[in-house]
Amino acid sequence: MGKTIRVEDSTHSALKAMKGEDETFDDLLFRLIDERRESVREGAGLWKGSGAAEKAREMREEMKRTVGAH
């Protein structure tokens, strides 16, 4: 069963411009979602082995401690 999604005219125009000639809007949206997932997968692990993730956690904990102290 299909669903209706309301979008502004400008959004519809932008999506229509992105849509391939033989592509439905459903195909387009699925492609965009799939591209986004792939982008996230490609970015996953960028900090691995760099120590940056641990440093970010430490900074966050420090910020939580200092904010609570005032």
Image: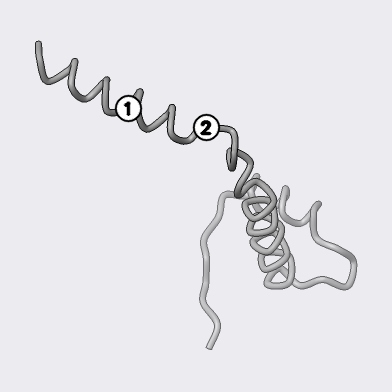
Most foreground residue, 55 or 44: 55
Q: How is the image coloured?
A: one colour
Q: Which mark is residue 60?
A: 1
Task: From this view, report whether residue 27 is shown above or below residue 13.
Answer: below
Please indicate whether residue 59 sits to the left or right of residue 68 in the image.
right
Please indicate whether residue 58 sits to the left or right of residue 27 in the image.
left
Most foreground residue, 20 or 66: 66
Q: What residue does disc 2 label? A: 51
- Measured from the top left, where is residue 47 in percent x and y? 58, 38
Q: CA distance from mark 2 to mark 1?
A: 14 Å
Which of the marked residues, 2 or 1, is nearer the chain's N terminus? 2
Secondary structure beneath dot 1 equals helix
**Amino acid type for the residue under numbered disc 1:** Arg
Rendered residue at 88%/73% (across/down): 22
Rendered residue at 69%/58% (across/down): 38
Rendered residue at 73%/72% (across/down): 27
- Measured from the top left, where is residue 40 in percent x and y? 62, 51
Rendered residue at 86%/63% (across/down): 20
Image marks 2 and 1: residues in contact by CB distance under 8 Å = no
The image quadrant that residue 33 belongs to is bottom right
